[in-house]
Every structure is written in C-alpha cells, then in structure tokens.
C-alpha cells in the first residue's frame, strides 16, 4: 500500500504564479529494486558533504535480510521510501523490537535509517507513515532514530547535533544539520543525548604510574582476546555484557545467535590486543573493545567492495591512525575498583603500539557521569553529540 501526502506550495492554475509542488508518495519496500533505491537514496543527500562516509551496501543488505540476520528473529521491520516526481527523496524503517519490549515491560516502537532531502513535507510523510505502522501494532511510543537496535547497529543511534566538521568513527553516523529540525517539527522531544569523546594516548602517564598498584590491590589480571578459541571468548563476553549493561538505557540482552553473528562480522577487523578481558581469579568481570577506525579507509570506496573496493580498502587501511572504543563494561560488583582505568590503559597501550595513538570513545550517555569524569580526567574532550527522540503515539 502506498500513501500519497499532498505537498505544500501553490497548485497549478491557482493564479498565484507559484509552481506546483508534486505530492510525496510513501511506499513499502517489497522487492530488490526498491531495496536498492532505499539504500542508495542516501548518496544524493550527502553528495556535497565531505565528512560523510558511505556505508557498505553489502552490510546494509545483510542486516536488512529477514531470512539471514538474527535481529529479525525477535523483531518486525518495515522499510518505506518517499518518492516525488519519479525519484526517491527519503526513507525510513519502522521497527518493533519484541525483545526490547519484553525486557523493559513497555510498548516502544522505533524508527531508524532515516534519510530525507531538506523538505519538511518529505520528513512529515515518512515519520507519519512509520508512526501509523507502529500504532497498528499497538505501540505507545516512537523512539529514534535507532538503526536498528543498540545491539544490531548499522551505525550508532541519533541525529548529529554538533561536531559536523569531522567524519564519524567506524559504526557511528553522520547526518546533515537540518535533520534535527525535520524531526523536532513533527512533535519529537529529546530522549537522550549520546556523546563521543576524543582522546590522545599521550595523556595517560598518570594511569601508567598507578596501574601496578591497582592491579595488585584488586587481584586483577587482564589479557587480550584469544582468537584461537573465539567461541569460548564470545561466551565470556556475553556473560559480562548482559550483567554490565543490564540497567543501561536502551539495553536489550543479546541472544546467542546475535552475539555470534556480531563476532563473525567483526572478526576481519578485530585486533585481539584491542579487546582486553579482565578477571579476578578465574571469574570474568570486565571487557572492552576497540576497533581500528576503518572509516578512514571506507571513505575512499563509496560503499562498494566490488570490483575494486577491496583493493582500495586494503591500500588505505595501512594509514589508519586512530581507533574507536565501542564498549567498556564491568560487572556491577567491580565498579569503582579502578578496573575501568586499567582496561583503558590496556587499550591505549595496544592502540599506540599498533600505530593508533588517538581515537574516539563512543557512544556514552550524557548522564553516565562516572565514565565521563574518568575520560575527562585523562584529558578527553567531547567531540560530537547525537540525539535520540521520543514521541507519544497515544
């Protein structure tokens, strides 16, 4: 079913002298051609934005494949495109994540993968269609953009509020400044702000001095990920993850299938030294994960690995000089022990040794003051702010 939304502007022949504006038509994605149009509609929007990094088309197709990707085992996703005058001018995904609602005991729906030309009529048509689809499934709230969940991200949630003058780090998003207005004009209110911090590893001397004392006092051991026994390592990480993030905003426990799918997807780009695991005795109590900022290389291939993108990727990855720390978590019983600082130190040492003496820590909730204060004591500075919005549907 398609929905036609009248556009603003004068109608032809009304005597105003203004040109007629074609209506916006919103249609669900039903076949391969429409999926390609859904994916590719972002390219014209960012054509003049030097900071945008095109997502890998193959990655988007994998995540959106209802038969192959584990997210769809516990979620419903509907994709819509907005058209005008025979061309696609925007897109949106409407999402019901049943695992989220079961865990949080609510009826929250999501929108994600939002893109639009700078036209309020297009954004309004897309958001209203997603909201209608969510109401049909008895959702009380619409939250977004989330792409597609906090566990199965094509790139991080939210629209960019500040930090437009630098490219995003790997698996983080980039949006035009006008997206904020398009969303807020449709009744969406701030839910949470998500921050990225930029840090240079030359500022960690203070940690170096206290590391040995903290290790002895806490009885901690830290080691790098063992890729030769990845399945066992992933099980340890899953145990820590589901304990460490249980009370975090947006958290949903990862299923076995999801975490193993993620591990296989990240395997080609993971540097084991950048994934430390922390133990007290034999008990796993914390872990962290950083990745080389492959966006520095992906920037050169325009979303396509074939036929020559792989060659370019291999060439440009040699000059990657920064990393992104995606996650750092401790079991609740070991928070405040100084172990977070030891994991950060391990990451910084490993990243510097691999030729990445600087990088981004993201994303961090705006009210996560323990982590924010820890990073700021090391000289880290906020680099970007992303915003996630809510709108009541009832």
Image: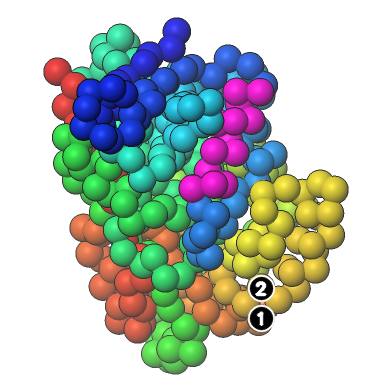
- Residue name at image x 38 percent, y 26 percent: 22
- Residue name at image x 66 percent, y 23 percent: 33
Above or below residue 360? Residue 306 is: above
Task: Give the Cα separation between the discs numbered 2 and 1.
Answer: 8 Å
**Where on the picture, by quarter, is residue 209?**
bottom left
The answer to whether mark 2 and mark 1 are in CB contact below 8 A is yes
- Residue 127 drawn at (x, y percent): 31, 28
Task: Name which of mark 2 and mark 1 comes first in the sequence.
Answer: 2
Nearest the camera: 161 or 257?
Answer: 161
Quadrant of the image for the C terminus? top left
The boundaries of the magenta stretch are 33-45
- Residue 96 drawn at (x, y percent): 38, 21
Magenta stretch encompasses residue 41: yes
The chief SS type of the magenta part is helix
Graded by Cα atoms within 10 Å as few (under 14), some (14 to 19) or many (20 or more), the crowding at tag 2 reads some
Nearest the camera: 231 or 299?
Answer: 299
Q: Which residue is mark 1?
A: 355
Helix, strand or loop at disc 2? loop
246 left or right, relative to 200: left
Q: Which residue is mark 2?
A: 320
Magenta stretch encompasses residue 347: no
């Amino acid at each position: 079913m398609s929905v036609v939304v009248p556009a603003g502007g004068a109608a032809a022949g009304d005597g105003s002298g203004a040109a007629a504006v074609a209506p916006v038509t919103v249609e669900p994605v039903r076949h391969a051609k429409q999926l390609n149009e859904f994916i590719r509609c972002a390219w014209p929007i960012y054509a003049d934005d030097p900071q945008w990094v095109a997502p890998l088309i193959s990655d988007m197709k994998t995540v959106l494949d209802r038969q192959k990707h584990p997210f769809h085992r516990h979620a419903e996703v509907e994709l819509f495109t907005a058209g005008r005058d025979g061309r696609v001018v925007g897109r949106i995904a409407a999402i019901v994540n049943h695992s989220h609602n079961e865990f949080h005991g609510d009826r929250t729906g999501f929108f994600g993968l939002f893109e639009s030309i700078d036209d309020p009529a297009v954004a309004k048509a897309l958001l209203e269609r997603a909201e209608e689809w969510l109401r049909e499934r008895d959702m009380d709230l619409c939250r977004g953009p989330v792409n597609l969940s906090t566990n199965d991200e094509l790139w991080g949630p939210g629209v960019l509020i500040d930090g437009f003058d630098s490219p995003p780090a790997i698996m983080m998003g980039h949006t035009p400044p006008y997206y904020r207005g398009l969303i807020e004009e449709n009744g969406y209110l701030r839910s949470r702000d998500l921050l990225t911090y930029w840090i240079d590893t030359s500022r960690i001397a203070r940690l170096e001095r206290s590391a040995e004392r903290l290790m002895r006092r806490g009885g901690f051991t830290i080691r790098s990920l063992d890729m030769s026994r990845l399945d066992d390592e992933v099980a340890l990480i899953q145990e820590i993850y589901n304990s460490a993030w249980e009370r975090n905003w947006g958290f949903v426990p990862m299923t076995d299938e999801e975490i193993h799918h993620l591990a296989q997807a990240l395997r080609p780009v993971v540097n084991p030294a950048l994934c430390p695991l922390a133990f007290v005795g034999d008990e796993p109590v914390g872990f962290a994960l950083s990745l080389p900022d492959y966006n520095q290389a992906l920037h050169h291939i325009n979303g396509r690995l074939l036929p020559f993108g792989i060659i370019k990727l291999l060439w440009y990855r040699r000059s990657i000089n920064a990393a992104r720390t995606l996650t750092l978590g401790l079991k609740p019983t070991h928070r405040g022990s100084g172990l977070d600082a030891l994991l950060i130190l391990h990451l910084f040492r490993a990243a510097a040794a691999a030729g990445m003496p600087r990088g981004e820590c993201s994303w961090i909730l705006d009210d996560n003051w323990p982590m924010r204060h820890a990073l700021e004591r090391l000289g880290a500075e906020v680099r970007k702010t992303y915003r996630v919005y809510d709108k009541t549907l009832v």
